[in-house]
Image (cartoon, rainbow, N blue to C red):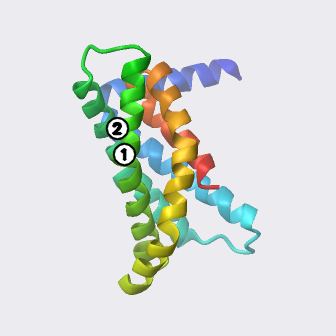
Amino acid sequence: MSDIVTEVWKKYLLQLQIHPLRTKAITSGVLAGCSDFAAQKISGIKKLQYKRLFLIMIYGFFYSGPFGHFLHKVMDKIFKGKKGSTTVGKKVILEQLTASPWNNLFFMMYYGLVVEGRTWPLVKSKIKNDYPPVQLTSWKFWPIINWVNYQYMPLQLRVLFHSLVASCWIL
């Protein structure tokens, strides 16, 4: 079994080198789909909502993966050549003050408008009520994850790590 896992991992790493954006987009889409599948099962629904599952996968594929890919490339350019705890801390703070609020807002809009099919006034009202506690909770959890990501993960694996953690966060 471990030979199979090792071989799949090698092929995955090769794809990250050859097609980094595509590989990260597919990875994020698949992990988002797995997360939604698990969330639906945990919620106790009788029949799997395939449309919802597909739309969450689309979000991961077209938004989360590419956004993460470019975010980490930009972060490495901003802090080019700088290492150490101070730099990691600055990356975490910058991401938490820019990408985190935007990502939470964008996901809430996407989920309300696209996945649930609600009207803009309803989505806007839900965001007005729910966004502040969502963002505050995010700021309690994600800085630790981002610290680990920037401190220990090589650039090419940061989107994978983030997507794996996000798949649990959504649950």
Give the amino acid type for the residue marked by disc 1 in the picture. Answer: Leu
Within 10 Å of disc 1 (Cα), the crowding (few <14, some 14-19, many 20+) is: few
Name the quadrant containing residue 96: top left
Amino acid of disc 2: Leu
Q: Residue at x 44, y 57 (%)?
A: 104
Distance of label 1 from label 2 (alpha carbons):
5 Å
For the residues labelled 1 and 2, say whether their Cβ atoms are less than 8 Å apart: yes
Q: Is mark 1 on a helix, strand or loop?
A: helix
Q: Name the residue under label 2.
A: 94
Name which residue lies at 57% across and 69% down: 50
Q: Position of residue 39 (x, y in %)?
A: 66, 60
Residue to which mark 1 is pinned = 97
Disc 2 on helix, strand or loop?
Answer: helix
Q: Would you call the spot at circle 2 few (<14 residues within 10 Å), some (14-19), or many (20 or more)?
A: few
Residue 75 picture location, percent across and down: 29, 31
**Is 21 left, or right, of 114 in this rendering?**
left
Q: Is residue 109 visible?
A: yes
Q: In this view, does 36 lie to the left or right of 114?
A: right
